[in-house]
Image (cartoon, helix red, strand yellow):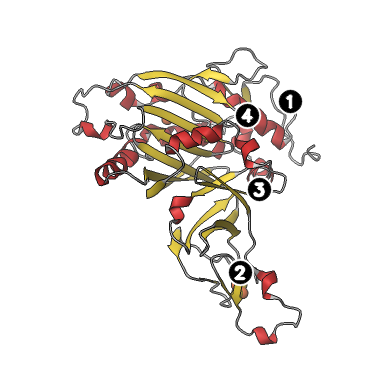
Amino acid sequence: MMNENPVALAWPEKGNEVPKAVFQREDIYRLELERIFHGAEWHPVAHVCELAQPGDYKTMDVGEVPVLIVRGQDGEVRVFVNACPHRGTQLKTEARGRAKMIECPYHRWTFNPQGKLMGAPGLQDFPASFQKDDYGLRQVRSAIVHGLVFATLSDETPDIDTYLGVSAGTIGRVFGGEGELCLLGYQKVKFNTNWKEYSDNEGYHAPLLHGAFRLLQWQGGKGEILATDRAHKVTSAQLNHAPDNGYLNDYSLIEKFDKNQPPESIVVTLFPVTIVIRHLDTISVRYAIPRSPHQTEVHYAYFARADDSEALQRHRVRQASNLLGPSGLITLEDGAVFNRLHAGSRSPGEVEFQRGVTDDYHYPRQLQQNDEAGNLVRWEHYRQTMGFERG
Ligand code: FES
Ligand SMILES: [Fe+2]
């Protein structure tokens, strides 16, 4: 069980209410880093196709801890703490790269892509007890599911299959099989909002906030939401065909080219903050990094299937950023609303969830696609992990 809570916060009695203080307070944010981001949760940090060749690396952060994901010469993808075992210098700062050796700039210790210390200048003057084998890069616990690389900083995190539950199969559906993908590119953005306001995005607002759905007469087909045991949220919906009503100069932007996949939208919102999504021909992982209570950085990574034709790949590039990127015509308004949510949560009181709530103390697990109550299982997991008592 949780130790005595160092942060005092009274949680409302009603299951559909969340105190606004959790979006603003610095002490709560510090506790979230400790218990959630550095705690017993798995965090997606890369897809293996982002590291296609031996020596390829990528930098990410798990909470505040910099990590380095590297494909070794043996083909294996490992996650390391991105800090030199000597004096702690951050080893790599660029988003991605390829290197035969990882060299620390401070005193030029070098490591191979498997993380082994290969050389250290002045070694003859180190204590006799110094063993190179003791100074490899510190490896972080990791697991790969459908090509998605997860990392956790805690030994207490359950195994990945237990953790993901049914969402693992849905991630496979998003990627369209065994995760044979290739990277198309990234878009990176910082939203001036709390990470929970970002990840609270739901199906209720979709046809209401987003003008594109109305302008394109894009009616949602049948869809449902499932909240898993471990507070992940799986939303899937069929996508009806939007008519070419002249609003777009180039209607092909919203066409479905990949005939191997049905026209659908699948969104896996993993606790705490990563979103894995396929919508029409867009395949994307949105890695998110909380930077403060007031800022969330999101890396939109876009993928193609490895066996796509060149034309289909080009279509995916265009559709991905123009439709579902941070300024895409479907999601453009989300960024503005995130900012406004955060400005509004400086006021006292609670936020409330209504649509899909069946009674005040019950957290529905199966819902309709336009419900917002699918987030309550996440909030209950959050409350328990943070050790906030009701009342
Ligand atoms: S801190 Fe890296 S070599 Fe000294
Ligand atoms: Fe949205």
The residue beneath circle 1 is: 390
Cβ atoms under marks 4 and 1 closer than 8 Å: no
What is the C-alpha distance between the residues marked 3 and 2? 25 Å
Residue 38 is situated, as x and y percent measured from the top left of the image, at 66, 48
3 or 1: mark nearer the eye: 3
Residue 133 shown left or right of residue 258 in the figure: right
Which residue corresponds to the image point at 76% horizontal and 42% vertical from the top-left?
Answer: 6
**Amino acid type indicated by mark 3:** His
Q: Is mark 3 within 8 Å of ligand 1?
A: no
Q: Which numbered marker is on residue 252?
A: none
Cβ atoms under marks 3 and 2 closer than 8 Å: no
Crowd rating for badge 3 (residues with CA inside 10 Å; few <14, some 14–19, many 20+): some
The residue beneath circle 4 is: 379
For the question of whether residue 210 can be seen, the reply is yes
4 or 2: mark nearer the eye: 2
**Amino acid type indicated by mark 2:** Lys
The secondary structure type at the circle numbered 3 is loop
The image quadrant where one finds ligand 1 is: bottom right
Residue 48 is situated, as x and y percent measured from the top left of the image, at 48, 51
For the question of whether residue 197 can be seen, the reply is no
